[in-house]
Image (spheres, rainbow, N blue to C red):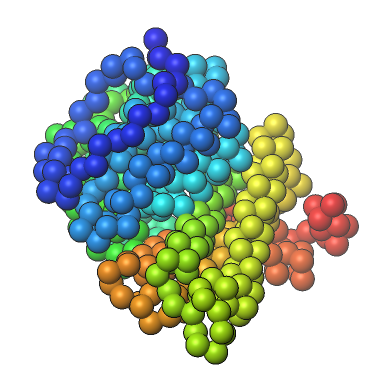
């Protein structure tokens, strides 16, 4: 039986050498210990996430630690109950709301957006089990996640013509037995996970999820992600060479994912990461402008934080961050309504458009704030010593995962031409609706 949430104790600071050693020997075997807390209260979950974020700040701010696989941080997240928030109450979990999940992601991203991005895979791909799995699969996997097991990402391939192409194969070898062969890239969190769903095609060409264990024979995971930012997402290569898969671990979607559990849900959480990056950049700007930056002589003030143009610019940046956060909250509310009526075309379209707006606003806030804080801090803000560029590097690397030009296009094409945006632009076709339908959705 899972324990109630315990008081949060400060994590011991762990140096770079020990972090590398732990990560290099990690194989992902999972044994439940029954001591993982369950965070049923939303405010408590967010408070735990905020304190956790402070604990792991150094892992993002320190260049020596920044790119090391964040095993220490993810083990801590599991121990605190942050990895099981999405588990439904029917299986003993908190069944946290979309807004609670977004607040948790944003809080963590404020100090360490790489860890926050890994949690997106935990919530959105774990939800595949809840939304697409059979009763037996839910009974098998959800108790493991509730006990602290971590779920990662193995969806996309780097050597195909399109990000939507899938060459990884799940082949039948016997009754209820299969083998998995192929290669994935952008496998966010897989290096520090216990399980991850691999998107593959079966013998009939159907797209399936094969949930495999991190320590499965025939699986090789490489620490070869070398992005300019989000360096600790461990989003590198995973290779599958005859990995054995049992029937219980093969999830066969009955249809395309719907907005409340598919790509749109994931994009809501990605927007929350960008809000967190913007907020974290502004937090750092407050510290830097008050303790390290020098006032420009023309301002005739003692501190850089007292310069009138700096004050105005900072205010503008804060408005961008708060507006993006408000749009994330609005989108979460629409997704919550959709979950109660998932077949409603009107709510489906509202959800896709609301998340697109949140994603676009958060992208702009993160990139603008992370760029401008260096300008406000002056020449010394560009010194590697302070590592202020990490906010822009993280924002730039993260925001290109989903081209924002297509979110703006979806919104503009809907309002101009009545074209309903798909939930997943990689595979779904757009539909055209009448002006009357557009008016209904806009209300």
Query: In the picture provided, is 246 more to the left or to the right than 99?
Result: left
Residue 162 coordinates in the image, percent (x, y): 39, 64
Q: Residue at x 62, y 78 (%)?
A: 308
Residue 297 coordinates in the image, percent (x, y): 50, 87
Q: Residue at x 32, y 67 (%)?
A: 386
Query: In the picture provided, is 411 more to the left or to the right than 435?
Result: left
The image shows residue 197, relative to residue 85, as above or below, that is below
Q: Residue at x 51, y 48 (%)?
A: 106
Quadrant assignment for the N terminus: top left
Q: Residue at x 50, y 54 (%)?
A: 276
Residue at the bottom extreme of this rendering: 298
Query: In the picture provided, is 225 more to the left or to the right than 441?
Result: left
The image shows residue 382, relative to residue 81, as above or below, that is below
Residue 36 visible to the viewer: yes
Residue 383 coordinates in the image, percent (x, y): 31, 75
Res 287 quadrant in image: bottom left
Closest to the observer, 275 or 117: 275
Closest to the observer, 122 or 104: 104
Residue 134 coordinates in the image, percent (x, y): 47, 23
Closest to the observer, 285 or 190: 285
Q: How many marks?
A: 0
Residue at the right extreme of this rendering: 436
Residue 237 visible to the viewer: no
Res 344 quadrant in image: top right
The image shows residue 14, relative to residue 379, as above or below, that is above
């Amino acid at each position: 039986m899972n324990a109630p949430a315990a008081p949060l104790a400060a994590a011991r600071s762990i140096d770079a050498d020990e972090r590398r050693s732990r990560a290099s020997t990690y194989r992902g075997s999972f044994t439940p210990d029954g001591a993982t807390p369950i965070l049923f209260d939303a405010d408590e979950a967010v408070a735990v996430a905020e304190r956790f974020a402070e604990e792991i700040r150094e892992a993002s701010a320190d260049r020596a630690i920044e790119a090391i696989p964040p095993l220490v941080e993810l083990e801590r997240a599991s121990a605190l109950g942050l990895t099981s928030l999405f588990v439904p109450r029917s299986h003993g979990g908190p069944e946290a709301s979309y807004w609670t999940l977004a607040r948790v992601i944003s809080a963590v991203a404020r100090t360490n957006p790489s860890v926050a991005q890994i949690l997106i895979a935990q919530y959105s791909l774990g939800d595949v089990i809840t939304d697409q799995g059979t009763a037996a699969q839910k009974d098998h996997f959800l108790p493991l996640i509730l006990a602290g097991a971590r779920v990662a990402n193995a969806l996309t391939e780097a050597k195909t013509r399109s990000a939507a192409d899938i060459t990884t194969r799940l082949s039948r070898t016997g009754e209820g037995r299969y083998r998995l062969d192929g290669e994935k890239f952008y496998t966010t969190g897989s290096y520090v996970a216990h399980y991850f769903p691999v998107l593959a095609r079966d013998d009939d060409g159907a797209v399936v999820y094969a949930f495999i264990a991190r320590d499965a024979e025939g699986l090789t995971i490489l620490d070869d992600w070398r992005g300019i930012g989000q360096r600790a997402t461990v989003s590198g290569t995973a290779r599958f060479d005859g990995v054995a898969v049992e029937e219980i671990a093969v999830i066969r979607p009955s249809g395309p994912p719907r907005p409340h559990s598919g790509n749109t849900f994931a994009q809501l959480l990605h927007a929350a990461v960008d809000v967190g990056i913007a907020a974290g950049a502004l937090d750092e700007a407050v510290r830097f402008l008050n303790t390290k930056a020098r006032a420009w002589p023309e301002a005739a003030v003692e501190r850089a934080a007292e310069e009138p143009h700096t004050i105005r610019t900072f205010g503008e940046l804060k408005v961008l961050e708060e507006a993006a956060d408000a749009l994330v909250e609005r989108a979460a509310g629409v997704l919550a309504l959709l979950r109660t009526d998932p077949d409603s075309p009107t709510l489906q379209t509202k959800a896709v458009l609301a998340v697109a707006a949140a994603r676009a606003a958060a992208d702009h806030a993160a990139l603008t704030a992370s760029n401008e804080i260096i300008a406000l801090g002056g020449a010394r803000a560009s010194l590697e010593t302070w590592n202020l560029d990490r906010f822009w590097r993280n924002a730039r690397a993260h925001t290109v995962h989903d081209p924002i030009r297509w979110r703006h296009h979806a919104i503009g094409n809907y309002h101009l031409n009545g074209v309903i945006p798909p939930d997943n632009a990689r595979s779904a076709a757009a539909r055209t609706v009448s002006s009357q339908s557009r008016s209904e959705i806009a209300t």
